[in-house]
Amino acid sequence: MSEMRIRTGGCACGQLRFEASGEPKRVGLCHCMTCRKISGAPFSAYVIFAADQVTITGETKSWSASPTTEDCFCPVCGSQVFARDAGGETEIRLGAFDEPNLFTPTYELWAKRREHWLGTPGLESFLENREENAS
């Protein structure tokens, strides 16, 4: 019987922590204006787990640019750690994990907003959001 893999991470100050168990649903990049603004970076890199695969400890604050997504951050240090969506998924920022190089993105969203100098060869590219029927 194989053991379920647990990956951990959290915010910069350590007050907000998470554990993600098992394998993710998908890994991607987003170049939308909301991701750019909340991260202060030209894109956001994230991994998507089913909500029941993620355990959060510590205090969070949230903000939402959309009626279906809640962006959660640490109220102490302000780190953008994860987001929850109405579809039962938790989106964890790749930089919030304790270890680097755990995941490799396979797609990108809002490619029409991608910086011209940023190359993303090999990724499935969507000009805006993924199709609703995509997994």
Image: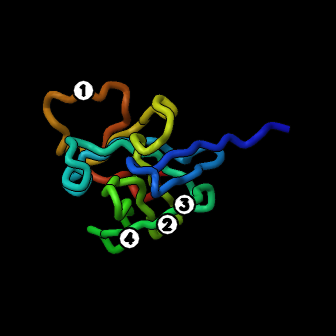
Q: Give the residue at x 20% y 47%.
A: 40
- Residue 24 seen from this side: yes
Whole-Å distance between the Cαs marked 3 and 4? 19 Å
C-beta proximity under 8 Å, tags 1 and 4 = no
- Nearer to us of marks 1 and 3 is 3
Q: How is the image coloured?
A: rainbow
Amino acid tagged 3? Ile
C-beta proximity under 8 Å, tags 2 and 4 = yes
Q: Earlier in the sequence, mark 2 or mark 3?
A: 3
Q: Count up the numbered dots.
A: 4
Amino acid tagged 2? Gly
User: Which dot marks residue 87?
Assistant: 2
Whole-Å distance between the Cαs marked 2 and 3? 18 Å
Secondary structure at badge 4 equals loop
C-beta proximity under 8 Å, tags 2 and 3 = no
**In-front residue for pair 85/39:** 39
**In-front residue for pair 133/45:** 45
Residue 11 in the image, given as x and y percentages of width and height: 41, 50
Q: Earlier in the sequence, mark 1 or mark 2?
A: 2
Residue 83 in the image, given as x and y percentages of width and height: 41, 60
Give the image quarter of residue 70: bottom left
User: Which dot marks residue 68?
Assistant: 4
User: Which dot marks residue 56?
Assistant: 3
Whole-Å distance between the Cαs marked 1 and 2? 30 Å
Amino acid tagged 1? Gly
Give the image quarter of residue 125: top left
Residue pointed to by mark 1:
119
- Residue 127 seen from this side: no
Residue 77 in the image, given as x and y percentages of width and height: 32, 56
